[in-house]
Image (cartoon, rainbow, N blue to C red):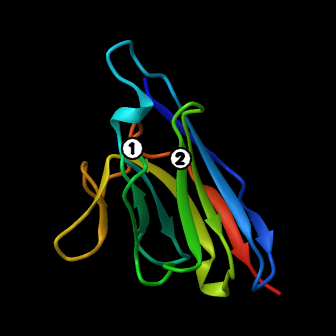
């Protein structure tokens, strides 16, 4: 069964940087990491989760929501089954739990979604890593 495991969260001051990683494991012989798009969602305290970035299976196409564009960079290493999110110029409003997701896409409404919808299905979502931006 596929498993997504995030790491790299922590406490950082405003203006600082963090790099999140997501290692994906559990592929069968018929599938592979490079078949899927991957992305990142976050959930701020008291709010619903929102998609913030998505990268295509090849890594050639990346998408960001306006709130993180220019500050965050998503990337992937298909040889290591790993997705990254480099976060620079962090702001207090970036605080939240960050989730790695599988099979994301950019919707017609210009939001980032997962093909399974809003439910955090186990093989499509990681358990999350906490990011806190505070002085």
Which residue is more in the foreground, 42 or 103?
103
In the rendered image, the residue lying farthest to the top is 29
Could you classify mark 1 by the number of other residues whose Cα lies within 10 Å: few (under 14), some (14-19), or many (20 or more)? some
- Which residue has dot 2 on it? 76
User: Which comes before the other along the chain, label 1 or label 2?
Assistant: 1
Looking at the picture, how far across and down is residue 87, in whole percent? 64, 70
Looking at the picture, how far across and down is residue 96, in whole percent? 59, 71
Disc assigned to residue 116 = none
109 left or right of 3 in image = left
User: Quadrant of the image for the C terminus?
Assistant: bottom right
Which residue is more in the foreground, 31 or 97?
31
131 left or right of 121 in image = right
32 left or right of 94 in image = left
Q: What residue is rendered at 38% in x and 42% in y?
A: 124
- Which residue has dot 1 on it? 58
- The total number of labels drawn is 2
Looking at the picture, how far across and down is residue 4, in whole percent? 52, 39
């Amino acid at each position: 069964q596929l498993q997504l495991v995030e790491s790299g969260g922590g406490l950082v001051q405003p203006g600082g940087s963090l790099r999140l990683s997501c290692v994906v494991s559990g592929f069968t012989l018929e599938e592979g990491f490079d078949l899927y798009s991957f992305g990142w969602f976050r959930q701020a305290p008291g709010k619903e989760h929102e998609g913030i970035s998505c990268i295509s299976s090849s890594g050639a196409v990346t998408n960001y929501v306006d709130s993180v564009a220019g500050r965050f960079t998503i990337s992937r290493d298909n040889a290591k089954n790993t997705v990254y999110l480099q976060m620079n110029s962090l702001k207090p409003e970036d605080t939240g739990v960050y989730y790695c997701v599988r099979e994301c896409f950019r919707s017609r409404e210009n939001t980032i979604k997962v093909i399974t919808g809003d439910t955090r299905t186990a093989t499509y979502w990681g358990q999350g890593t906490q990011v806190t931006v505070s002085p």
